[in-house]
Image: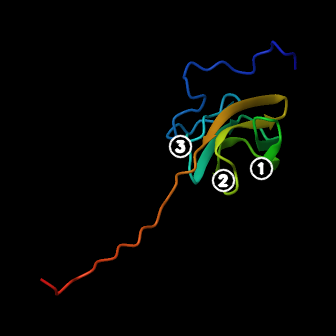
């Protein structure tokens, strides 16, 4: 496939058909993860118009591989993977889908929300 060759053109902004649409996917697509920013997990959705060897990986902004979500041959259809990001540092990361000759990347924002536990102590004094 040439660099300027278009696999499929989509009019929508998400790149993924509505969940109720049960027609075979027309083209490869990778959607934005949801929720984004995420904590502690997020879902990545993608479409395969034909059976393909799929790799779906998460990378740091330095290009280091942080996680592999898929690395197998998959049948055509609408797909989703839940990514539980334990151990992934806060910040901007990239996830990449490779299926056949198709490659697409998107950004994933990871936020750690600080949680604090408070102990409340109540003192009662009988002294007036």
Give the labeled residue for mark 2.
85
Which residue position is annotated with label 1? 67
Question: Residue 72: x, y in percent?
Answer: 83, 49
Pointer 1: residues within 10 angstroms few (<14), some, or many (20+)?
Answer: some
Dividing the image into 4 quarters, which one contains the N terminus?
Answer: top right
Of badges 2 and 3, the one in the foreground is: 2
Using residue 11 as the reference point, say whether residue 89 is left or right of it.
right
User: Picture quarter containing residue 93?
Assistant: top right
Residue extending farthest to the front is 128
- Work out whether residue 92 or residue 21 is closer to the camera in this orientation and state it: 92
Q: Secondary structure at mark 2?
A: loop
Q: Secondary structure at mark 1?
A: strand
2 or 3: tag closer to the N-terminus = 3
Label 3 sits on residue: 35
User: Who's the residue at 63% across and 41% down the image?
Assistant: 45
Residue located 77% across and 43% down the image: 57
User: What separation in Å lies between label 2 and label 3 (alpha carbons)?
Assistant: 12 Å
CB contact under 8 Å: marks 3 and 1: no
Q: Residue at x 72, y 41 (%)?
A: 76
Q: Quadrant of residue 128?
A: bottom left
- In the orientation shown, which residue stands out farthest toward the top? 4
Q: Which mark is residue 39?
A: none
The image shows residue 108 at horizontal and vertical percentages of: 64, 38
Give percent across and percent down for residue 21: 53, 37
What separation in Å lies between label 1 and label 2 (alpha carbons)?
9 Å
Which is nearer the N-term, disc 3 or disc 1? 3
Mark 1–mark 2 CB contact (< 8 Å) = yes
């Amino acid at each position: 496939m040439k660099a300027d060759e278009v696999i499929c053109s989509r009019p929508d902004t998400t790149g993924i058909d509505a969940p109720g649409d049960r027609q075979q996917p027309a083209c490869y697509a990778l959607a934005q993860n949801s929720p984004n920013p995420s904590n502690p997990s997020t879902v990545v959705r993608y479409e395969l118009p034909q059976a393909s060897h799929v790799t779906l990986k998460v990378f740091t902004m330095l290009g280091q591989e942080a996680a592999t979500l898929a690395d197998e041959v998959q049948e055509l259809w609408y797909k989703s993977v839940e990514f539980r990001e334990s151990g992934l540092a806060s910040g901007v990361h990239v996830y990449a889908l490779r299926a056949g000759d198709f490659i697409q990347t998107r950004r994933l924002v990871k936020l750690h929300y600080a949680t604090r536990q408070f102990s409340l102590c109540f003192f009662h004094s009988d002294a007036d």
